[in-house]
Image: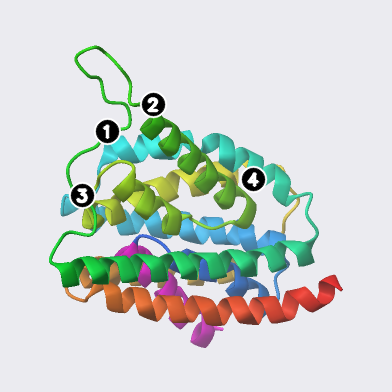
Amino acid sequence: MLAIVIPVGLLIGLSLGALGGGGSILAVPALVYLFGQDPRAATTGSLLIVGVTSLIGMVPHQRAGRVSLAKGLVFGVLGVAGSYLGSLLSTTVPENILLASFSVLILVVAGLMTRRRRRQARAATAGTPAVAESPAPVLRLRPRFACDCPRAVKVVLTASAVGLLTGFFGVGGGFAVVPALVLALGLSMPLAVGTSLLVIVINSFTALLFRAGQSVTLDWWVIGAFTLAAVAGSLLGSRVVSRVSPARLNLAFTVLLVTVALYTAARSFPQLL
């Protein structure tokens, strides 16, 4: 068991620590196909693994000044309603449909990561920053006390969508949180990566609370081993983020995500016919 858990857990943690997301989406297919868990147990176990890993992995980012507590708390709290709805919906969807939908989600994530990598590469070639790093608060009071509502609406919708994905699929949602924090709140990429871990913690443990009444049997040995390996990977990732090109990490995890998505689709879609 350890021969499988350790490398997969390290990958999950490495992605969370270095990229702020992406790796957590590997936990569900790993628990389903490597350890034979049913999708509902796997998504619940994934929330535990991702929540604990993100909480501990956030510490070195916080010490390095790469976590905006106020903005992270606001974004996380805004996603609570979506997390509740997602947790309810997950109980009404057949397992095969849940896994098939999950494979589509992984491909979407891979596409988003590819798009981000290419955009950053073009910006670097042009000699301009990929995104503006000036502060951009959610609700900005102007001299006439006018609220920047379109931006506020964008943040609320994004946070709710991330919460929905967390509750439904048992993923952290960092792949959506990071670009949202960069584009909607104007955070720099390193600050967005660290802050996204705080958002993932809030979303994960909120979704777990909403699932507390569901009848799910968890394999605590597997979850514990996964979590320990993922925590080690997240601490390593927090160091890697300042030493290795994010584009290279992004590319490596994108290839891994596509592989997992195709395998999940090959196993789940034929059962829908």
Q: Is residue 155 above or below residue 226?
A: above
Residue at the image position 20 percent from the left and 49 percent from the top: 132
Give the labeled residue for mark 1: 137
Residue at the image position 38 percent from the left and 81 percent from the top: 252
Q: CA distance from mark 3 to mark 2?
A: 20 Å
Question: Residue type at mark 3?
Answer: Ala
Q: Are marks 2 and 4 in contact (CB under 8 Å)?
A: no
Dot 2 falls on a residue whose secondary structure is helix
Residue at the image position 16 percent from the left and 68 percent from the top: 126
Marks 4, 3: nearer the viewer: 3
Q: Main secondary structure of the magenta part?
A: helix
Region rendered in magenta? 1-19
- In this rendered view, identify the residue nearer to me: 266 or 213: 266
Give the labeled residue for mark 2: 149
Marks 2, 1: nearer the viewer: 2
Q: CA distance from mark 2 to mark 4?
A: 26 Å
Q: Is residue 211 above or below residue 122?
A: above
User: Is 160 on the left or on the right of 91, as rendered?
Assistant: left
Give the labeled residue for mark 4: 86
Q: Is residue 258 above or below residue 164?
A: below
- Color style of the picture: rainbow
- Give x and y (percent) for residue 227: 46, 66
Dot 1 falls on a residue whose secondary structure is loop
